[in-house]
Image (tube, coloured by chain):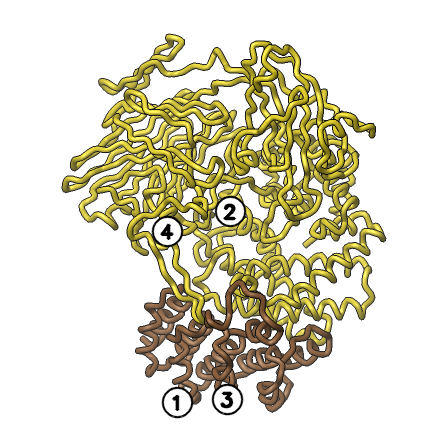
Chain colours: A yellow, B brown
Amino acid sequence: MIDLGATRRKLQRAEAVPGRLGQVWRAVRRLARAHPDRTPWLTPFVAVMDNDPALIAHARRGIADYLRGAAEQGSAGYLFNIWCFAFPHCRWALWFDLLRRGGHYTPEEADELAAQFLLIQHRDHHAGLLVKPYPECVDNQAASLCLSSLVVGTLFADTPGHGHLARFLREEAALRLEAMIGGMPRSGYSGEGSTYQGLIVAFAVPFLVEMLERMRGRDLFDQPLPPRGTSARDILLMTSRLWMPGGLLLPWDDYGYQFGIAAPLAYLAHRTGDTPMLRLLEHAVNWSRLNIDSAGWGFDHAVWSLVWWPLPEQPAPDVRWAGWASDEVGGALCDPGGRRYALQMWDPTGAMCTRAQVNPNSLILEADGVPLCADGTPDSKRDPLQYPGAVYERNFGAGAFQRMNLSKGCGGSHNAILVDGNEALRPSDRYELSRLEAFDAAAGSITGDVTGLYRDVYADCQRMRRRTRLVQDRFWLVEDLARFAHEHDLTSRWWFRPGVTAVPGGVDLVTPEGERLQMRVLVGSGAAQVRRVDGYPLAPDGCSDRVDYALQGREARWLWLLWPSATRCERERLDRGWRAQPAPRGADRPALEQAAGKSFDLEPGALPWMQADVPVEESWAFAREVAVPADGAWYLRLPRGLGTSTRLWINGEPVEIPGPQERRELLQPFVACPAHARGCARVRVLLCLEYEVGQSGKNDRACSKPDLSAALCVDDPAAVGVRSAAYADGTVTVTTTTGETLAVPHALMP
Amino acid sequence: MRLTTDLPTFVRIDRFFDPATPLDDLLAALTDDNWQIQQAALQALGQRPDARAVPAIVALLDRQDALPLYGAPDQWSLDGAPDADTKEIWRCRFRVKQAACHALGAIGAAHGAAALGAKALERLATYATSQKDDYCTRAAACQSLGRCRAAAARPALELAAQDGEWCTKTEAGKALAALG
């Protein structure tokens, strides 16, 4: 699976040219060399690439530690979630094989360790595979279990012993292999949300397809595979669509907004040479999380990115975003610059709406890189969503009973239409598929028909459609049509990030980042009921503002104007001019200010050891002076990825960084000018970050996305808002705060 | 009943899957102290279905059923720290029963349900709906009843098809379809 010679040559070349691949490789290598025992998932690869005896000794110890721990496993968490350990077992076996092939074990040692890998696979994981109904079960769990039996059985089929057990494992898994790709839905979307699609299913695809091709002896990447005709490319392409321009994955399941990993994109680039994938790798991935994000329940995604990532002839130009649509799951509208992004979704679900949720035509909006809508999982301590009837109970046997609150997955938790106040909207197990009615990327229009889902619950539903338009790459028009045979109470529900106020004819949202969304009702009821929901979703804000518009009748039609605008702008990008120094952990300000050690010209917006060959230390202090408006009307925008240990001083005084931990991790905090700095034309900023140099814990990790450095920001006097908007005679007329008038033809849906 | 992952254990298990290994060696392994040896022998029996193995498999299931209700909440907290013996029983859990069900299913598929005898069939039907067993055992029992085309198990399979757990429900549905 890893061509040692070719990979080594590629990485050597990458070091010699500008570009992200070389930068990531250097960072991985520096981290593993500095902390080999704290980075066990990185060390074997680096050790073999560099053929370094000291690192190889660490890698051998890491493998031995892994096997010792795995042999002792037996907790409930292990046995009830065995797939979470099977896929890592497979990769540890690959790392061991890498060292074995490099001649770093004697034959006797190698036999002993191979036997242990096989016995653990047989004892713990293979039985888990056999539980999964074949061929019906195609999901992250089955793929993980299939891979581990297949890879371990293949690697050790010749030695030790006579290979009988290895072949038993391999052959039972091989039967299922093709279906792990071909049995995925044709859209390529597993239905399990961004977390499982992006961090597990798609991460497994390269392993699956490589093993399948090895078995069949031919290229199968683009081949539609049985039983559903899905190809590996379909799955990876869908995975690339989970990325929003702001750098987060779609909150397309109950885990909500989060960062993605690059390995699936790297493999797609490797197999296709697609420039868009190279651009994503270069510009959209948060590489500062290379050692801490779990993918396939392990921490080696950066290594696999390095393995698959093709070295481009020259650094890829910036990302050009584009819309897409899939009949089965939804579609997105986006301008090329990624300033305006909307996803309209209707992916299949059933009564058990845990990961695949009930989101008929729900919208996710992002503007200027800032998410506007709320979706995700509630804070488990508060669990504010308690819809009547949204409970599922099941018995795993032997005393393992589960009672689940499904409210977060129901229609009432998404931007959808509710009927007669039924927030627990969820279809039965079988219902007519929702579908794409129309999509025109050039015109910026998408229409989804979800009548089938509603008809499954309300027999008299005749039509349920939503059309979303991106107009002039500036704003959205959204039209809803709900038609029933009988009269109902119909509610258009929206979940926004906190910061909503009701205004005549709609609502205004201003996010903590200063992104404004003006929502105006052009057709339909404009009386908005706004309610703060504390505890949902957990990320990024720990709360949301729920907006309901109600109508009564057999038919409801709404036409909305959604006008985003950034109310703050950068005055100065603070990506240079910092004095950066390693600092003692927990040091107080005077100690940080007076540290006498060597300082470096680094910025806090990326890992220090990704920027230069510097000590891989956990704690770093960044200091610089910033010229600011003396009237105090400014904000310090910090990098994202800040942990609870981040400390900030302005002019020597400690300043609190606003927002909950989840928001500081995902989005850039804005720190308003503190009272003590008003009147100053220059301020001294001291920022202390605690980085994670191991593969656990929750220390700070700044974001390496290039356009998200720290910056000095001010309120944007040129921000254009809506002064008035109306719909008449087939035309939407918008007058802006600058006096500009826009007339947009819009024919209502039949 | 301590578990090992050493080379001698491996060599022994590896040999079970060698078609040349005598049946008696596999049957003898069903009474081994190490449950992983039992599990491997059962899986190997599933690879070379022989009706002569049925009484030994049923006897093994008798012993398994006599073990404590290892998953019962009053004996085992899902988050608790177990002693070594409990941990070993916990590790074993469904694995031996699952392998036994699959072995019986393979024998029934090869030689017909009658070759299993009433006791083995009854045991499979009981497991198919047993809420005190792991769903993995229930699913394996349903699958095996389907492979045997055990018509007498239809009522149990119909009940299992209503199981709240997906693997069990799916296997029961497939088994009912196999019965026609």
Indicate the chain on which mark 3 is placed.
Answer: B
Residue behind mark 1: B118
Q: Amino acid at mark 4?
A: Leu
Q: Is residue A717 above or below residue A11?
A: above
Please name whichever residue, A544 or B101, is drawn nearer the observer in this view of the structure: A544
* SS under mark 2: helix
Which mark is on residue B87? none
Total marks drawn? 4
The image shows residue A740 at horizontal and vertical percentages of: 38, 9
Q: Amino acid at mark 2?
A: Thr
Residue at (53, 58) in percent of width and height? A143
Q: CA distance from mark 1 to mark 3?
A: 14 Å
Please name whichever residue, A738 or B176, is drawn nearer the observer in this view of the structure: A738
Q: Amino acid at mark 3?
A: Ala
* SS under mark 1: helix
* SS under mark 3: helix
Residue behind mark 4: A406
Query: What crowding class fits label 2: few (fewer than 14 Cα within 10 Å), some (14-19), or many (20 or more)?
Result: many
Q: Is residue A628 left or right of residue A240?
A: right
Q: CA distance from mark 4 to mark 1?
A: 43 Å
The image shows residue A190 at horizontal and vertical percentages of: 46, 50
The image shows residue A151 at horizontal and vertical percentages of: 63, 62
Query: What crowding class fits label 1: few (fewer than 14 Cα within 10 Å), some (14-19), or many (20 or more)?
Result: few
Q: CA distance from mark 4 to mark 3?
A: 43 Å
Looking at the rendered image, the quarter that the C terminus of chain A falls into is top left
Indicate the chain on which mark 4 is placed.
Answer: A
Q: Mark 4 or 3, which is nearer the eye? A: 4
Residue at (76, 33) in percent of width and height? A582
Which mark is on residue A195? 2
The answer to whether tags 1 and 2 share a subunit is: no
The answer to whether tags 1 and 3 share a subunit is: yes
Indicate the chain on which mark 2 is placed.
Answer: A
